Image: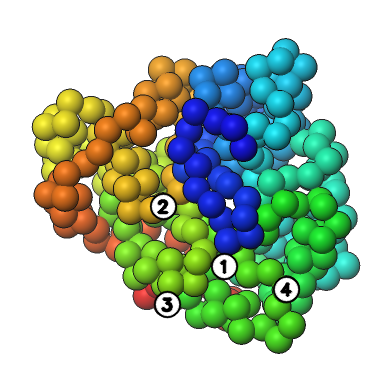
């Protein structure tokens, strides 16, 4: 990994840039916008791009990466590309084909990181969110430890340099770590993490196991209508955060990102605006004082913007646990 950005070392020896670019696209945004945003992000200096099968933008991300490689802006080895295994493909025989499809869409021979998107298996089929005739989610009973073994095989096959999980609580992580015959432990757990949900207990747990916490929703999410309660508080308008921002002569977004990075969290920032993308990359240009960090710690209210209610009835629903 060669990058102007700060990188951190994962437990398998690979390096991940501490700031990544998120690519989730709400339904009301055209796919062309994702292609444009990814092009702008790589042009601005992002080398870590986070996507997922279920975001349905892997093709656009692949086009952007390939065009920047062809233009000589980056080499493949400069880029750190993450994608995710969706919950309908947790049956062992479906894991590698799912990754191969993602690689085809991304126009890549390998991804740098392949992640299980949630610990909740759903029934395989034509729909990403399968439901029965009453609109009830069709969940599955696959043991995610069996799915994990297939991810290990994908790593051995060179299709993924590193493997990890997302939205796992500490008990679910523990199950993978204690799995008989474990070959590779997860390099990361990607979770919602921001000033209102600072995940301090989960962060301490992950650090104790040499697993990186990767933060999505780092700026309080983009408040997508289909997932986020529009009456929920707007993180970047928080008066305490704005006060710390003013004192440091930075934007609230930069302070929110810096807070995470200074705690040893890898942060994902998302924007469709080039000026915001460039500004977010300035997160490495300053430090917050211990007093500022303590003030920001005080904003935690264990508030989740994205509670994944559609999984709530499943025994593996991860957010019933405190952390």
Q: Earlier in the sequence, mark 4 or mark 3?
A: 4
Residue 301: give x, y in percent of width and height. 24, 61
Q: Earlier in the sequence, mark 4 or mark 2?
A: 4
Q: Nearer the viewer, residue 15 or 190?
A: 15
What residue is shown at x 73% (from left), y 21% (from top)?
Answer: 69
Secondary structure of the residue carrying tag 3 is loop
State the separation of the CA atoms marked 4 and 2.
25 Å
Reading the image, the residue beneath label 1 is 311
Disc assigned to residue 206: none
State the separation of the CA atoms marked 2 and 1.
26 Å
- Report the mark closest to the observer, 4 or 1: 4
Q: Quadrant of residue 43?
A: top right
Q: Earlier in the sequence, mark 2 or mark 3?
A: 2
Reading the image, the residue beneath label 3 is 321
Q: Is 46 on the left-hand or right-hand side of 205?
A: right
Secondary structure of the residue carrying tag 1 is helix
Other-residue count near label 3 (Cα within 10 Å), few / some / many at <14 / 14–19 / ≥20: few
What residue is shown at x 35% (from left), y 40% (from top)?
Answer: 257
Residue 249: give x, y in percent of width and height. 17, 26
Quarter holding the C terminus is: bottom left
Reading the image, the residue beneath label 4 is 183
Q: Nearer the viewer, residue 69 or 54?
A: 69
For the question of whether residue 178 can be seen, the reply is yes
Quarter holding the N terminus is: top right
Q: Quadrant of residue 77?
A: top right
Secondary structure of the residue carrying tag 4 is loop
Reading the image, the residue beneath label 2 is 265
């Amino acid at each position: 990994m060669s990058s102007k950005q700060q990188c951190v070392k994962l437990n398998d020896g690979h390096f991940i840039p501490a700031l990544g670019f998120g690519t989730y696209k709400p339904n009301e945004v055209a796919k062309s916008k994702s292609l444009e945003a990814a092009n702008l992000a790589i042009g601005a200096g992002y080398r870590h791009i986070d996507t997922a099968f279920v975001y349905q933008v892997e093709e656009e991300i692949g086009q952007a990466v390939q065009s920047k490689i062809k233009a000589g802006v980056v080499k493949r080895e400069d880029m750190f590309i993450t994608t995710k295994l969706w919950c309908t493909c947790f049956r062992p025989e479906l894991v590698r084909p799912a990754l191969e499809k993602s690689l085809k869409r991304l126009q890549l021979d390998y991804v740098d990181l392949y992640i299980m998107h949630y610990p909740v298996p759903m029934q395989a089929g034509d729909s990403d969110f399968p439901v029965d005739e009453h609109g009830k989610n069709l969940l599955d009973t696959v043991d995610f430890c069996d799915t994990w073994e297939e991810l290990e095989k994908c790593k051995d096959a060179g299709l993924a340099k590193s493997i990890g999980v997302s939205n796992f609580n500490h008990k679910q992580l523990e199950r993978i770590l204690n799995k008989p015959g474990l070959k590779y432990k997860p390099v990361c757990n990607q979770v919602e993490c921001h000033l209102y949900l600072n995940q301090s207990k989960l962060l301490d747990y992950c650090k104790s196991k040499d697993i990186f916490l990767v933060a999505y929703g780092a700026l309080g999410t983009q408040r997508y209508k289909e997932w986020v309660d529009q009456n929920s508080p707007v993180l970047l308008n928080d008066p305490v955060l704005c006060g710390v921002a003013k004192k440091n002569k930075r934007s609230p977004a930069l302070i929110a990102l810096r807070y995470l990075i200074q705690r040893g969290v890898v942060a994902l920032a998302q924007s469709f605006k080039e000026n915001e993308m460039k500004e977010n990359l300035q997160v490495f240009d300053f430090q917050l004082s211990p007093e500022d960090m303590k003030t920001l710690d005080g904003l935690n209210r264990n508030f989740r913007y994205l509670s994944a209610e559609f999984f709530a009835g499943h025994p593996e629903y991860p957010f019933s646990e405190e952390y």
